[in-house]
Image (cartoon, grey):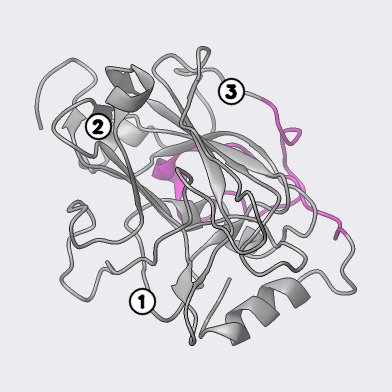
Amino acid sequence: MRPLLALGALLVLCSCGDGGSMPLPQYDIVDGGSRADAGTDAGASDDAGTQVDAGTEDAGTDAGVRPVDPFADRVTDYAFGDFAGFGQDRFPDVVFGPPVGAGQNAGSLDVLSLGRGGSITLEFTDLLAVDGPGVDLLVFENPFQKYGGGIFAEPARVSVSDDGSTWHDFPCTPPVSKEGSYTGCAGLHPVLSAPDNGISPLDPAVAGGDGFDLADVGLVRARFVRLTDMGGNSYGGTSGGFDLDALAVVNGQLPDGGTP
């Protein structure tokens, strides 16, 4: 929600008009196989927040017909919070595929704002995250380095699950003072990888974003990832909420246990 520094913040903060909650359309919960027009018809919908069980067949092409990739394949649940709205005209397509980072000093517009307290659950269907060496999962938002120091950030708690029922939360700690910062959350580090700049979205050392090790929550494999906006931010104003760009599997395994 940030095109270039503070201008991006202005766009998102203004995307809801007078600061109130804007009326939100509802969307079909679909997989990445129906990217051509999925979610753009506000007239056909499931109720927001309805959980679609793993394996439930829904309208749209089965994600298995697409080549195996390390990015999120399906939205299974969502609940937009206050001040959401940005990116919904491209939902769910906007949260599939690789990150579109804008670098250290700018925030990408290729994002979906969850709104204050909003959440979204995504599923990997062709390549699941597994516990391996170091970081297993990367979460990309659109924070950026502010001139004069500090990061413009809107953090979210990351939760993971293998079966969609039992969840494991990564610690996401709010600052103890106004001058402090969140720790352990997603949305804290600028995104450097983009499809056209040659920076791998699968290398935690260069991609940017925030890395998570499944070993930290005692999980061997994760099929589902839930992101929940923390309702706060680094700038002290009204929050437009966590802005999801992409998810990427760093250490992956095929659903049948094989390697890609």
Q: Earlier in the sequence, mark 3 or mark 2?
A: 3
Residue ID for mark 3: 52
Q: Is residue 26 rendered to the left or right of residue 223? A: right
**Mark 2 crowdedness (10 Å alpha carbons): few <14, some 14-19, many ≥20:** many
Count of numbered badges drawn on the protein? 3
Which residue corresponds to the image point at 17% horizontal and 60% vertical from the top-left?
A: 200
Assign a secondary structure to mark 3: loop
Q: Amino acid at mark 3?
A: Val
Residue ID for mark 2: 127
Q: Could you tell me how far apart the alpha carbons at marks 1 and 3 are, in whole angstroms? A: 36 Å
Q: Is residue 6 rendered to the left or right of residue 131? A: right
Q: Earlier in the sequence, mark 1 or mark 3?
A: 3
Q: Earlier in the sequence, mark 1 or mark 2?
A: 1
Residue 217 found in image quarter: top left
State the extent of the magenta-drawn residues as a range. Answer: 21-50
Assign a secondary structure to mark 2: loop
User: Percent from the top left, x then y, of residue 33?
Assistant: 39, 42
**Mark 3 crowdedness (10 Å alpha carbons): few <14, some 14-19, many ≥20:** some
**204 vs 120: above or below:** below
Main SS, magenta region, reads loop
Q: Which of the labelled discs sits on residue 104, or is there none?
A: 1
| Residue 107 in view | no
Assign a secondary structure to mark 1: loop
Q: Which of the labelled discs sits on residue 253, or is there none?
A: none
**Mark 1 crowdedness (10 Å alpha carbons): few <14, some 14-19, many ≥20:** some
Which residue corresponds to the image point at 42% horizontal and 43% vertical from the top-left?
A: 32
Q: Nearer the viewer, mark 1 or mark 2?
A: 1
Q: Could you tell me how far apart the alpha carbons at marks 1 and 2 are, in whole angstroms? A: 29 Å
